[in-house]
Amino acid sequence: ETGVTQTPRHLVMGMTNKKSLKCEQHLGHNAMYWYKQSAKKPLELMFVYNFKEQTENNSVPSRFSPECPNSSHLFLHLHTLQPEDSALYLCASSQDTGRGPDTQYFGPGTRLTVL
Amino acid sequence: GQNIDQPTEMTATEGAIVQINCTYQTSGFNGLFWYQQHAGEAPTFLSYNVLDGLEEKGRFSSFLSRSKGYSYLLLKELQMKDSASYLCAVLDSNYQLIWGAGTKLIIKP
């Protein structure tokens, strides 16, 4: 238990569906992150939020839409996804934005399959 | 471009020692992390090195050579529960984490 929870753990969706991934951290951290993890590939940083403000958007397609209502919660809204978007989506949090040797704490991920 | 290299997969025997290497080429360096990730679980923090040398934490040790752009994770007295993927990540000059693809470690009895 890392103090970061994600729901759902598994999600299967069609290309026309709309779904949302949820992340919650119980560590009192100020920064939250979304990553995409595909088999045998490095973690891809998607979005970073610091104090609820988005500070990074690494050229992610608009079919992924993040939302951070407060420092403890982070959502990833999904719509009209493609099969190549199937992956493990990991949420992480850290004390700060990474302007220093911040350790990131990860949730268990949502395994997403797009049919 | 920025690059982190680590072996894709390694196999070792229970009770033995294994060394997982990581080489990096990044825009600046502000430290190197090792994470462990069991299948279907969250990556968990193992170590952080920013100065050259060896840091020991129980059965796990992490080594860094900044001049060579090289690190290794040393696991001693291997246990079956050590079967996992080990992720190397470097903090670059912009404090962005650059990740390797991970090394899958298989422990055999």
Image (cartoon, helix red, strand yellow):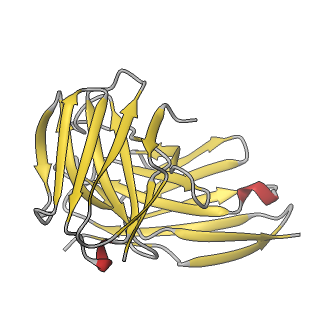
Using the image as rendered, state which of residue B16 and residue B51 is in the foreground: B16
The image position of residue A109, as x and y in percent, is 45, 52
Disc count in the image? 0
Residue B69 higher or lower than A67, as above or below: below
**Quadrant containing the C terminus of chain B in the rendered view:** bottom right
Using the image as rendered, state which of residue A104 and residue B46 is in the foreground: A104
Whether residue B57 appears in this view of the structure is yes
Residue B3 higher or lower than A79, as above or below: below
Residue B51 higher or lower than B24, as above or below: above
Using the image as rendered, state which of residue A39 and residue B44 is in the foreground: A39
Left or right: residue B6 compared with residue A36:
right
Left or right: residue B77 compared with residue A3:
right
- Which residue appears farthest toward the right when viewing the image? B109
The image position of residue A104, as x and y in percent, is 39, 41
The quadrant holding residue B1 is bottom left
Residue plotted at (39% across, 38% down): A103
The image position of residue A87, as x and y in percent, is 39, 68
The quadrant holding residue A89 is bottom left
- Which residue appears farthest toward the top when viewing the image? A28
Whether residue B78 appears in this view of the structure is no
Residue A3 higher or lower than A82, as above or below: above
Residue plotted at (18% across, 41% down): A67
